[in-house]
Image (cartoon, rainbow, N blue to C red):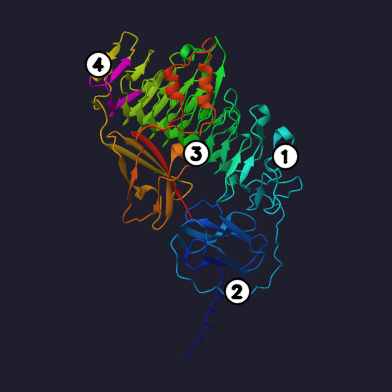
Amino acid sequence: MTVSPTPTPTPTPTPVPSYSIAASPSAVSVGGPLAVTWNIPSNQSQTDWVGLYRVGAPHIAGNELWWRYTGGSPTGSFTLNAPLVAGQYEFRLSLNNSFSLVATSNSVTVSSTPAPTPTPLPTPTPTPGPTPVPTPPPCPAPCPTNRYVSPTATASGDGSIGNPWTLEKALGRVESNLTSPVPAGATIYLRGGVYGTGVTTADNWFSTYLSGTEANPTVIRSYPGERAIVQWYLRLAGEWITVRDLEFTILDTNRYQRSGGLALNGTGTKAINCLVYNTGTGLAMFNAENNQGGREVYGCLVWGNGYFEVQPGVFSFSNGGWRGNGSAFYVQNKNGLALINDVIAFRNFSTGVNAYASDSYSDGIHVKGNTLFDHPGGNVLTATFDNPIKNQKILDNNFYNGEVHLGYAGGNLNTDVVMTGNIVTGWNQGAAQVTAFTVNNWASAYIQNNKFYAAAVEVFYNPTRNAFFSGAGYVWDNNSYYGTYQGRQSPQFVYFAGFGGTDVFGPIADWRAATGKDLNSTVGPRPTGMDIRIRPNQYEQGRAHITIYNWANATTANVNLSTSGLTNGQSYKIQDAQNFFGTPIYSGTYNSSSPVITITLPETESPINAYSGVLETLLELQSQPQYYTVSAVDIDMRTPKHTAREFNVFVVLPRP
């Protein structure tokens, strides 16, 4: 019998170590001790690095809250203090000075409530390896290196936190013949203080070609916990730049000429959670034909921007030889999208969103989730003369005291507009009365699920002929209309049909009969109850905007914060948007099992002192009746004052 040979056992494969990163402890109070350990099994580099991120934050430059190079060590650890804002965090391991993510740690819950004193962390034993590089040299993009600037920096600065640059050097101010030394993908932190002289001439312009990339934008932001106030008119001509958490203003009281503000002129430029107030320009998007889209304004508060132009016998506003000039957002765009999302803008000198172009473009402008109010020239104005508007969207906004005006009577026949989910209120206080909604010259319009209210004037006005109105290009239904007109308990519709159609000057029944539109819409004399809208911030966890239409004129409002983005146990405060630097109207710790809070609403209109020179200039013009006419309506519309109890806007802010 043949005996089979005994098979040779297959060797057990040696386990291949994998990349790993771990955080300890998994729960810690704000500012408490935190440790991270990592393992890099092979091909270590001195520029492998560890970064701390909020859970869910995109893995791109500018989102890291803390970082360190590993110095080429295969294993090791770092200790640090936990963030000062409660939330969920994680560490990430990336290789060779890039954003090539190879491992993510367990999540760490940072709580604002005191946690038990943890067992002291042992001092890690250094792992032999290449000598770490304490201060890495500038590196090619993408690079997680931070740069720092200060209003007290000297010419000898090197951009480090201990020896910062001037803002002109860091950004490369063109007007000073400077070029930025900052690599694409870096983050530039502005330490607290005031930057710029605040002069009101072109000497105040600050242009920069600083750039990033779409995958790794360069970020300009305030240093955490500090107020960086910029008095320049900052014009971003480079690509993929994100400006965050900065203040732009002019402290001077001269309202006859004005500079300052922020212009997003390059492809992919963004302004996130900034404050822009009392400047000449506000926030602008120009250079329509030379950029490829990707521009965005998000979460900003914009108020009091503009100046008075005075030319007796020239300007016809109020027949008075003067006009208010200045918008919250002046937008022109041709390629891609220009987004204005989740902002609060109010009491700027002319308009809220001004998408006007006489010889340029206003295409691809999307306006979503914003609160705009108290704009004498309208909360939204869109019009062009040479190039028909394409792909315009007005979505889920809150408008109060100001018209929404889409298209000019003498302008182009525009291509398409979508307007849904908005609340639109014409000027509803004081002596001024303005139509709520005007539409002119669109081949296609989708107007659905909006609420319109005009107290005593037309809720809809069309002073020109819409040739294609009755065609399939117009979908206009399921809206709600409120208002009275000459004692009639329904709003007024004004529509010029043209081409043999029936003109309308009357209630909704006449409008329906002439157009076949709004067959399923509703009508009433005045809205009732309370409409509370909350928009959580997509860039800062726990930050949110609250808009309240208080049609019942109640003294308090019960606000449910469950959709605000706050986490259980997180401390927060609520600021009145119209008095942003004042005392919080509410402070507390969020309790997810009891998310409803009660806030008191202001009883009457009250003066606000945060608008330098506005009323003083109006009264000065009024004192010269031989040159200027300033009416009671002008004074009422432009005097800096808080809205009455009927309408309020608040900002939820996380706090340490």
Q: Quadrant of residue 532?
A: top left
Disc 1: CA contacts within 10 A as few (<14), some (14-19) or many (>=20): some
Q: Which mark is residue 300?
A: 3
Contact between marks 2 and 1 (CB within 8 A): the answer is no
Task: Tell me the residue that label 2 is attached to.
Answer: 123
Q: Is residue 301 visible?
A: yes
Please check the rendered image and state whether residue 22 is part of the magenta-colored stretch, yes or no.
Answer: no
Contact between marks 2 and 3 (CB within 8 A): the answer is no
Nearest to N terminus: mark 3 or mark 4: 3
Residue at mark 1 to residue at mark 3: CA–CA distance: 28 Å
Nearest to N terminus: mark 2 or mark 3: 2
Q: Helix, strand, or loop for circle 1?
A: loop
35 lies left or right of 131: left
Q: In this orientation, which residue lies closer to the viewer: 49 or 198?
A: 198
Which residues lie in the magenta part? 473-494
Nearest to N terminus: mark 1 or mark 3: 1
Residue at mark 2 to residue at mark 1: CA–CA distance: 44 Å
Q: In this orientation, which residue lies closer to the viewer: 453 or 333?
A: 453
Task: Tell me the residue that label 4 is attached to.
Answer: 510
